[in-house]
Amino acid sequence: MLVGYARVSSLGQSLEVQEAALREAGCEKLFAEKRSGTTREGREALREALEFVREGDVLMVTRLDRLARSMGDLQGIIEELNRKGVGFRCLQQGAVDTTSSMGRLVLNMLAAIAEFETDLRKERQREGIDKAKAAGIYKGRPKSIDPTEIQRLHSLGVGATDIAKRLGIGRATVYRALTT
């Protein structure tokens, strides 16, 4: 059986293109989620897909980075699939097919490149933050809001919208603080 796995990193992104490509490739069962792919942690659809596949199945993704962003995670997932007798294919990197020796070689090369790109992106981000700090522009993450201040304002009869405006936060943050 061909089993598809689709993932996007943020809630604002759409899974439709990946799901359509996986169906067109013949996937009979799809697992999809909107989660960061930097680690396997918290990726419930991936966990379910790995539990679902059986010997002789093939797990498919549209792009390698949809499955894993680090060499360690990718190798762990592929090892798990191999132990179960499950193959792995990547649609956009067609040479990635663990049912062949060449496919396994290409997979490992692409995984190393993907991890390298992630490291470069982190380095550039760190350099940008350091430069902004040196220029006095970067203030860092804003301090967290003290829920007791929200509750105090609410107890004085201030509405959620006004509390949010006064504190420079979203109304959802106000409501969360009031329900805890």
Image (cartoon, rainbow, N blue to C red):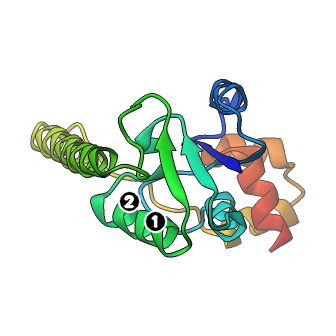
Query: Mark 1: which amino acid?
Result: Ile
The x, y position of residue 74, in whole percent, is 38, 59
Q: Vertically, is 22 above or below 74? A: above
Residue at left 69%, top 40%? 165
Q: Vertically, is 64 above or below 24? A: below
Residue at left 31%, top 66%? 72
In the image: residue 129, left or right of residue 167:
left
Residue 77 badge? 1
Q: Quadrant of residue 121?
A: top left
Query: Mark 2: which amino acid?
Result: Leu
Quarter holding the C terminus is: bottom right
Residue at left 67%, top 67%? 54
The x, y position of residue 43, in whole percent, is 60, 62
Q: Are marks 1 and 2 in contact (CB under 8 Å)?
A: yes
The x, y position of residue 177, in whole percent, is 75, 65
Name the residue carrying label 2: 74
The front one of 13 and 136 is: 13
Q: Quadrant of residue 152?
A: bottom right
Q: Secondary structure at mark 1?
A: helix
Residue at left 28%, top 59%? 71
In the image: residue 124, left or right of residue 37:
left
Task: Single out the residue that lies furthest toward the right.
Answer: 157
